[in-house]
Amino acid sequence: MSELSLAYIFHNHQLMVDDNLELPRVEQLADDLSFSCDEQVIARDLHVQEAIPEGYQLVPIRQLISQWSKPQFEKASRALQLLEWRRNHGFCSHCGHATEVHPTEYAMVCPACNYHQYPRVQPCVITVITRGEDEILLAKNASNSSNIYGLIAGFVEVGETLEEAVQRETLEEVGLNIKNIQYLASQPWPFPSNLMIAFRAEYESGDLVLQEQEISDAQFFKFDQLPEIPFSGSIAHAMIQHVIHNRAISE
Ligand SMILES: [Zn+2]
């Protein structure tokens, strides 16, 4: 039997894969983050001066999203988030002492005060808003130089329900009131550690007034006259396809 582990080896938001986008198998090192799936899996950063083996290359993770299957991407997303969490929790946030890896749980433990730090996900709502039978609201992000029009999204604030977050973000970003808010689906999104929670809603009232630091343009587009939309594999893409073609969001 092979002692080799399936390896997620990251470097600057890229992942090491072969020409068929398959992961390498490597010998596990003592400080590797290992987690159990259906087989032995490790995740780590590319070591300083570690050579990329023949036949392998570093591919941007965002590119893999559209080429890998959903389960494949979700496993990589988990590896990336756990690794990032471990990297960012080397010290106790309570007393500042260096932490240790818990032997059996996903926890970084402080040997001085016993405070346990667990991985956190950040809930983020994303909403597809329709008006009438054939119009969809799409917005262009001010910080993005591309011509892609996406959906209204934002982080859930402390003390807020998901539905309140959907209403607040829509009002803040485009000045609209919405109704009939319905949950659609969710997607873990490892940039850096978000859980995207998808809703659909209908336009109720108000004129488009943009929050200019965040949104450079927003319009209601006819279903058959869409601008460039987010790439396949993103939940925004699936949500837009869902309202326009009544296509299921997750397979
Ligand atoms: Zn501590």
Image: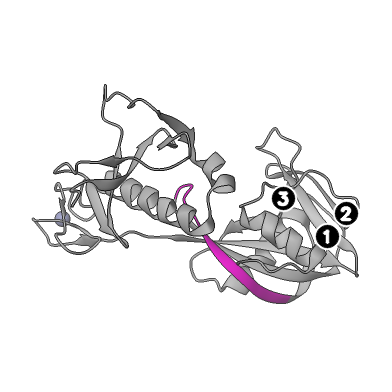
Ligand 1 image position (quadrant): bottom left
Assign the C terminus to one quadrant of the image: bottom right
Taking the image as shown, residue 26 lies to the left or right of residue 250, namely left
The type of residue carrying mark 3 is Gly
Q: Earlier in the sequence, mark 2 or mark 3?
A: 3
Highlighted magenta segment, given as a residue range = 181-192
Residue 212 lies, with reference to residue 206, above or below; the image says above
Q: Are marks 2 and 3 in contact (CB under 8 Å)?
A: no
Please give the residue where the numbered disc 2 appears in the rendered image: 221
Dot label at residue 136: 1
Q: Are marks 1 and 3 in contact (CB under 8 Å)?
A: no
Taking the image as shown, residue 135 lies to the left or right of residue 110, namely right
Magenta stretch: residue 157 in it? no
The type of residue carrying mark 1 is Ile
Q: CA distance from mark 1 to mark 3?
A: 11 Å
Query: Residue sitting at 48 percent across and 66 percent down?
Result: 158
Magenta stretch: residue 190 in it? yes
Dot label at residue 150: 3
Q: Are marks 2 and 1 in contact (CB under 8 Å)?
A: yes
- Give neighbour class at mark 2: few <14, some 14-19, many 20+ (Cα, 10 Å): some
The location of residue 69, given as percent across then percent down, is 53, 54
Taking the image as shown, residue 6 lies to the left or right of residue 61, namely left
The type of residue carrying mark 2 is Phe
Q: Earlier in the sequence, mark 1 or mark 3?
A: 1
Give the farthest residue toward the left.
112
- Mark 3 residue's CB less than 8 Å from ligand 1: no
Residue nearest the viewer, comparing 4 with 129: 4
- Mark 1 residue's CB less than 8 Å from ligand 1: no
